[in-house]
Structure formats: C-alpha cells, structure tokens
Amino acid sequence: MTATPMPPTAAPSAPAATPTDAPAVHTAALALGDDALVLSHRLGEWAGHAPVLEEEVALANIALDLLGQARVLLSLAGDEDELAYLREERAFRNLQLVEQPNGDFAHTIARQLYFSVYQNLMYGQLAATESALAPLAAKAVKEVAYHQDHAEQWTLRLGDGTAASHERMQHGVDALWRFTGEMFGPVAGLDLDRDALREQWTARVTDVLGKATLTVPEGPQSGAWTAGAGREGLHTEPFGRMLAEMQHLHRSHPGASW
Amino acid sequence: MVTTAPEAPSAAAGPKAPPAPTEPAAAPAPTALEARLHALAGSVPDPELPVLSLAELGVLRSLRVSDTGHVDVELTPTYTGCPAIEAMSAGIEQVLREHGRDDVTVRTVLSPAWSTDDISAEGRRKLAEFGIAPPRPHAADGVVPLTLTVRCPHCGSTDTELLSRFSSTACKALRRCVTCREPFDHFKEL
C-alpha cells in the first residue's frame, strides 16, 4: 500500500470504521479485506526464507494477489491505509486462521489449503450476487483458483512424499484444524449459502487429504475462545506481534510516502 | 493540468472512484477525436512486457471526451494486485498530455474481470516472439488444467514441463522445454 499524506496530528490510534456503526457491506468488506491483508503479510514473511527460490516467488506472488484484493476491499470500507496501519488489534476482523504464524513450510501449505479452498468457494458464491463486492469476487476467484492449485499440489507432494514430509504435513493439517470452523460463521453483509460452503469445503479438503495419504483431523473445528472469534475482533497472541511489525513504519513516520 | 481521481493512481480502488459520467444503456459510438485518443492511449507499452501495447493486452476499456474537453479513461488490471497499473496510468496521461490533452482522469474498473482471452491475436504473436508462451484460449469457464500442452516459444516443441506455478510475475508460470532444455515463462490463463 502506498502511504498517503496524513495530518501530522493524526492520532496513531485513529479509530477506523467499526462494524457496529457501518453499513453491512462495510462489515463484509472489512472481514474479507482483513483476511486478505493479514494472510498477505504472513506469506510475505517467507521472503528470504522459503525452501527453494521458486517457492519464494510463488508465495510472494500469492501474497501480492491477496494484497491487491485487500486494497479494493478495504477501500470499500474506508481509507485503506488508515485501516491497515492505524487500527488496533481488536478492530481487525480477520479469521484467526490467517493470522497463525507460518511454522514450517508444510504448516504454511496446510493454512493455504484450508484458506484457499474456502476463499475460492466463497468468492465464487459472492460473484453471483448483487453485492457491491461481486465485481471484486468475480476477479479474485480466478486468481485464487491458482492459489488453491498450488496448495493442493504441495499437499499431495508432502503428504505422499517421504516419512518426514508426511509427518510434517499431517502435523500442520492437525494443528490448524481448530481454526477452520470460523470460516463458516455468519458475516453481516455477506449473503452466502453457508451450509453449502461448509459441505463443499469439507468434501474438497477431505478428497485432497485422502489422496495425499493424510488423515482428516477429527477434533472440533472451533473451541472455547481461541477460535471462532476473529470476526468479532478477538485474536490469538501471535497476531499482536505481527501487527506491530506491519504497522510500526507507518506509525513511526506519519505521512511518509515514497 | 492532469487530474486523477483521488485514489488514483494508487489504483485498484475502482469502487471508490467517483461515479462515472455514465451514458445509460447504449453508449454513443466514439467520435473521431475519441477514436484517435483511444489509439494513442492504446499505443502505450505495457511496463512489464514492453513488447505489448495496452491495446494488445486488452486492458484499455474505454475513453470518453466530455463537452468540456475532459478525457475519462477506463483501465482494468490484469491481476487485482498488479503494480503495473500505476505505470500504465502514468503512461496514458503522459501520451495524452504530449498531444495537448491535460485534463485527464484514468480510472480503474474491475468489472467485467479481465481475461487472457482479451489479449489480441497480434499480442499473442508478439508474446511468443518475445520468448513467452502465450495463454491458451479458454474452452470453458474456469482454470485451464496446467497439464495441457504449452508450446516452447524457443523451439516450438510441445514437450514442456511445469517448474513453478508462479514465475517472475503473478501472471506467469515458469516452464522448461524438455526438447531444447530452455526454461521459459508462460502467460497463465486467467
């Protein structure tokens, strides 16, 4: 995002539009925009650390797609830079899944698998509605199809690979399972068939994990306060540290621009 | 004076753009002036693939001149996050300014979504000549399976393999020709 000039007096904690006093479409744009922004930042953390150069480029490209989606969505909800850089943790509405730390490569791929299958189905439904988000959804769904393909191919290779890669992939899939239930919760302004979403997501993920010789986790898909609350602004501990890194430059130099 | 919409050229903010001076239903046929300016704007080279013009890439959606002489240009991004859109906007403003048009607004529109089918036949030919395998036309909706044959732009062999789904830019995949062993970019179908 480009830094837009701001009055030097702008309080660093300038409150952004909160879902409670904004039209429903703002709530929806904020939720989906935050998903894209936060996952984009997480994927960007792989720069310089990916196992091979091709994957470094791939993850950065996926991050760029998500960042582009985030810019459009956040601009629908307000000022993109204010929303990205000047909100406190509790004002973010992203799923807890996307804020989870990268872990090892298999862990990141598991997160990509869960999220890209969801995003592909969700955007697909959204594109067919009259929502103000439909044009973005129609464009983004084509990009996300490649993200999903990328995640599925890696899930197959790692799951049906060596004993070590299988173990790591299974661990990633298991560890993130409890954050998947939140994807099927209601979001104001998003008129989706959530039952179909859950059904199709479960079918696809089950199919891919099966082909990858992995076991579909059996535990709950949400639990206690740790999952199911990102949409309400409750986040897991690592998210605060991620935000600090993402926001500190903009907050330290108000009004800075390229 | 060159004006841009408040959020341009930071692009991608299509929905935030001021309402277009929409011509309801059937837009009038472009005037001779509009056609001439459209050709000028369309001649701007793509910043990442300079062998292609914006017209050949299919990203220039419309150009209208108002009664007051204001030029309104609609541009669509290839990928939502494509950073080249800002350079495209600047390039269009520059070429129009060079031809005496200072009052220009370049707006980003998302709908209908750009498709690689919007790349012209001439554009595809130039891509191949440049060493980039052009996108295949869509037979139907959805992603074209990457296992379909992509022809090597260097030796023409159809025996090529995928190295990575994402290459130097989001719009390309990295492949290798099994016959001549050269790696090459493939413009992915979108």
Image (cartoon, coloured by chain):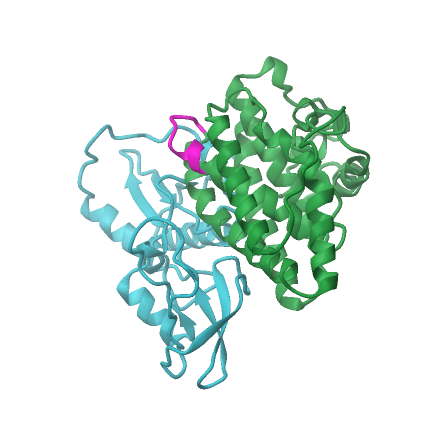
Chain colours: A green, B cyan
Q: Residue A175, located in which quarter of the rendered image?
A: top right
Residue at the location (75% across, 55% down)? Answer: A104
Asked if the stretch drawn in magenta spans residue A225, the answer is: no
Residue at the location (38% across, 64% down)? Answer: B52
Magenta-highlighted residues: A124-132
Counting labels gives 0
B120 relative position to A200: left or right: left
- Of residues A36 and B65, the one nearer the viewer is A36
Location of residue A173 in the rendering, given as x and y in whole percent from the top left corner: 68, 46
Q: Residue furthest top?
A: A21
Residue B13 visible, this angle = no
Residue at the location (73% across, 27% down)? Answer: A223
Q: Residue furthest bottom?
A: B180
Residue B154 visible, this angle = yes
Q: Residue B22, located in which quarter of the rendered image?
A: top left
B2 relative position to A187: left or right: left
Location of residue B14 in the rendering, given as x and y in whole percent from the top left corner: 45, 36
